[in-house]
Structure formats: C-alpha cells, structure tokens
Amino acid sequence: MPRPVWSGAISFGLVTIPIKVLPATEKHSIRFHQYHLADMARVRTKKICELDGQEVANAEIGKGFEVDRDTVVEISDEELDDMPLPTAKAIEITAFVPYESIDPVRIGEGYYLQGDGQVAAKPYTLLRKALERSSKAAVAKFAWHGRERLGLLRVQDEVIVLHAMKWDDEVRSPETLAPKEVELDEAEIERAVLLVDSMTADGIEGQEWATDRYTAALEEVIAAKAGGKQPPAAAEKDEPEGKVVDLMAALKQSVQQAQASRGEDGGDGGDATVHEMPSKRGAEKQAAKKQTAAKKPTSKRTTAAKKTTAKKRGA
C-alpha cells in the first residue's frame, strides 16, 4: 500500500478512532514531458520572481493571499495545519444516511482508512459493523489541504472508505438540461428495460470491456518508435452513413445483439428496420452519376444531329 497522506482520528459520538488515510486508487496513464522538437532537448518550467527576474527555488516559495494591489498576506503551511477548527485533525461524523440517498455527482476521490495502532482496532471494528448492520453511510466533516470538506464513510471489504464530497453550492443544477416532454409508447419502455436486462453484468471488475485500450495502444506506439519501427497503423473505418432509425426496431436489434453476445437465443427480438441515408460523399457520387447520365443522351442526340446535317450537305 502507498504511504499515508493524512493522519488523525474519526470522531464517532464520544468514541475516538485513530486512523491513517491512504489513497484507494492509482493512475496508470502514461505521462509525457515537453521537448524542443528541433533537437529533442527537455523543456522545463522555471519559477521566476517578477521583481528581480531571478529563478526561485521551491524552498523559497510560500502561499499568500492578495488583499488588494498593495497588500499580500503570507499564509504558512503550519498556520493551515493549526486552523482553529474542530475537524482540523479529526473526521467528525455528523449524521448517518442511506447510501442510496447520496447523489453520485457529489462523491469524489476515495481513500482507505486504516486503524492507527492496536488501540484503534476495537472502535474501528465497532463503527464498521454498525455501518454494515444499519446499511447506512456516515456523513462527516474534516479539514484537509487548507479547507474544510464534507465526507462520506462507507464499508468495502471490511475496510472503511472515505470519499471527499462536494458542498451543496458546488453542484450545478441540471434542471435546464433535461429534454422537453416527449411521448413514449409503453412497449418502447418495456423493450428498453429488456435491453438493460440483456446487458446487465455482476459488476465492473474482470469484465473484458473494463480495460484501458488507449493506454495499451499508446504503449505499442512508444515501443515501436523506440525500436526504430513504424507504429502500428489504425484500422481503416468506413465513413459512417447517416441513418434514420425506427426506435422500436433499433431496440429489438440491440436486444438481439446483446443476447447473441451472451450466447442466448434472441429469437423474439424481431427484425430491425433501419433506413440508411447516404453520407455527404455518397450524395456527391450519386449527383455526379446523375449528371453523367443526363449528359450521355444529349451527346448522342448531338452526334445524330451532326450526321443528319452532314448527309444533307452531301446531297
């Protein structure tokens, strides 16, 4: 496991649980540096003081807040750590709520909470079992990285997980984004539910589609170029055709495909009717053909007219 990123205690009524906070996730994406393309020399970012134009070392850089154009207040890391907040060194549980009641948009990064020492074992287990038996999640407040945050505690595989959450005023309202009222046939809704059932999986972990294909492809490109080879070419794709799809027919075909991918019989799905519209390129080709076809009879008539004129002159 990685190193703890924070340490403190969970405040559970009058119960205190010493804990360490560890990242629950890690990033595997490939990171790039910046290079000068002319000679492939590394390009680095330098921190320059605006007054004397000199480069400044990280040890000489601190935090400050600009009160006005002439006044900047320096704030040290020690002052941030010693903020007069009851949550400065504690994750203070304020309420317990059904986990389903939490809007997923509010839920952020996840962190594992590890009991800090043997003294934490019993109260840690007590809180975990209380959450499990009540089927509830705990809402908490804690101070971290210079601000007070809202948190969510839940249980996963016998470990308490902390999620940072957004405050109410940090979540935008989606009410203006919903489409206007439309009429839906009950059969369409039922077919959509059938499609959901056909595509339902036990979870994300271990699924063939739950893989990062972009990173794998990028690794192949880097390996090929590092070996002096051309990177693998992407498969050519046909230009997509514009389609006018009958919604019910598309749902039926989608159910058939989902069932076929699982080796199930999709016999009751029916045949989908898809009306294809030519793409822009296809339309241009058809227009060119029509123009060519329109020109050919004119050409024949002109040739015939020339022959008739020539015969008359010969006579």
Image: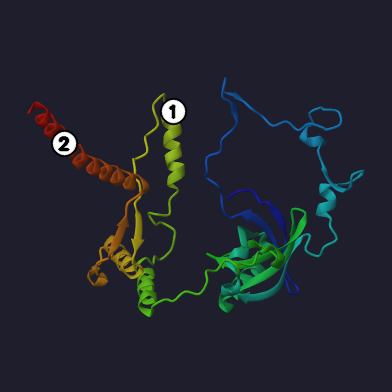
Q: Amino acid at mark 2?
A: Ala
**Badge 2: few (under 14), some or many (20 or more) residues near its Cα, within 10 Å?**
few
The residue under label 1 is 225
Closest to the camera, between mark 1 and mark 2, is: 2
Identify the mark nearer the N-term, 1 or 2: 1
Question: In terms of secondary structure, where does tag 1 sit?
Answer: helix
**Badge 1: few (under 14), some or many (20 or more) residues near its Cα, within 10 Å?**
few
Report the front residue among 201 and 185.
185
> Residue 308's image quarter?
top left
Image marks 1 and 2: residues in contact by CB distance under 8 Å? no
Q: Is the residue 73 above or below the residue 306 in the image?
A: below
Report the front residue among 79 and 209.
209
Residue 238 in sight from this viewpoint:
no
Dot label at residue 43: none
Q: Residue at x 64, y 27 (%)?
A: 43
Q: Position of residue 101 (x, y in %)?
A: 59, 74
Residue 27 in sight from this viewpoint:
yes
Question: In terms of secondary structure, where does tag 2 sit?
Answer: helix
Viewed as shown, does residue 257 lie left or right of 50?
A: left
Q: Residue at x 69, y 75 (%)?
A: 95
The residue under label 2 is 305
Q: Amino acid at mark 1?
A: Lys
Distance (Cα) linking label 1 and label 2: 66 Å
Viewed as shown, does residue 292 lie left or right of 135?
A: left
Q: Residue at x 33, y 70 (%)?
A: 248
Viewed as shown, does residue 268 lie left or right of 304?
A: right
* Residue extending furthest toward the left: 315
Q: Position of residue 41 (x, y in %)?
A: 60, 23
* Residue extending furthest toward the right: 70
Q: Position of residue 78 (x, y in %)?
A: 83, 49
Q: Is the residue 221 above or below the residue 119 in the image?
A: above
Q: Position of residue 215 (x, y in %)?
A: 46, 43
